[in-house]
Amino acid sequence: MALHPTGEPGPYPAEVRHRIRRDTQADYAYVAHALNDCGVKVVCLQHGGGIWGGEDGGYLIDFIRALRVPMVATLHDVPARPSASQRSILNELVDTAGATIVMSHAAASEMARSYGISADRLDIVPHGVPHLPQVAADTIKPRLGLQGRAVILSFGLLEPDKGCESIIDAMTAVVAAIPTALYVVLGATDPNRLASEGDSYRARLEAMVAARGLGQNVRFVDRFVGRVELGNWLEAADVIATPYPDLDQTVAATLSFAMAAGKAIVSTPYAYALEMLTPDRGRLVPPGSTEELAATFIELLGDPELRAAIGRRAYQHSRGMVWWEVGAQYRRIFDRTMSEADASPRPFPRKLATVVA
């Protein structure tokens, strides 16, 4: 099953048998009924902000109310201050699912604090990461035109919650100490932001770079990159930064991937970073502290042995997060959910109220 955002191109490969158009409410119950009748044994549903159609993703309720097949729900984020609608939707999703997966202990704690859902109703499975060999950054840099540079990397869809401004602010001091320093901003602008306001945020960042005379020390890579190329960028980085301003953030794929690449990481102390980055496998700096951010970059870029030691410990910690380990945990949860559903099958879905096409 695929979720099809408005305006996105098709077609889908042959294995995609059903499609929900995100903003077409009638599709949600229709596809649920189709899944009920096609022999599917378990549905793995991904939930996060902005994924599903309707206010706060409310169209999803039509889907879960119509579904008879056992369902496992994965929560990609857990809003810390939910609206009444967000709380209602998430609580009904958890009540309906045979199992609910969160990706961190911080997320489980937030579920208890903001939604009244206790930890014993949740499975904690880490965010999956690719298996990357731990290699010396200088051996990969020539592939990307980075030879001779001390590279700081941030990556992912570009939007204000990545904290790029703070890194650009820090770069003046970093470059004064390490002239070869280069900050790479890897990733296309978030499509939703691009649709609503164009590329104005990237333009503001570029203006900051120009105003500070950092044109030779900040590089924007404005595109999506595939799995192999992303691996090259991760391996070529000396330091990876996630100075996110939202300290309630309970999971960050970027941080997980940085650990999988065995890199020294510099981060603000948002909830997920606090959980993952002990002092021996990362550096935490206060949000908004340009001086401390710059000093931490200078320390790590100037000390290869320290950088390597931190990266090794981050890499070792990430071994339980590689895809096949995560997949094995999911398989066990699927088997358990199907077994429990066989023992106590769900009733036939109740008829929905009027559905607007």
Image: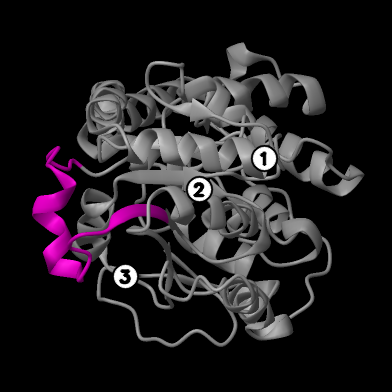
Vertical order, 340 against 142 (above or below): above
Is 62 magenta? The answer is: no
Q: What's the residue at 17%, 63% (across, down)?
A: 147
Q: Position of residue 314 (x, y in %)?
A: 31, 26
Residue contact between numbered discs 2 and 1, judged by CB atoms under 8 Å? yes
Q: Earlier in the sequence, mark 2 or mark 1?
A: 2
Question: Residue at label 2?
Answer: 45
Query: Closer to the camera: disc 3 or disc 2?
Result: 3
Distance from Cα at disc 3 to Cα at disc 2:
25 Å
Which quadrant of the rendered structure holds the N terminus?
Answer: bottom left
Q: Which mark is residue 225?
A: 3
Q: Of all residues shown, which one is farthest toward the front?
A: 176
Query: Closer to the camera: disc 1 or disc 3?
Result: 3
Distance from Cα at disc 2 to Cα at disc 1:
10 Å
User: Is 140 left or right of 103, judged from the image as shown?
Assistant: left
Is 143 magenta? The answer is: yes
Q: What's the residue at 57%, 23% (across, down)?
A: 274
Distance from Cα at disc 1 to Cα at disc 3:
33 Å
Q: Amino acid at mark 3?
A: Val
Q: Position of residue 258 (x, y in %)?
A: 35, 41
Q: Amino acid at mark 1?
A: Leu
Vertical order, 348 against 303 (above or below): below
Foreground residue among 121 and 313: 313
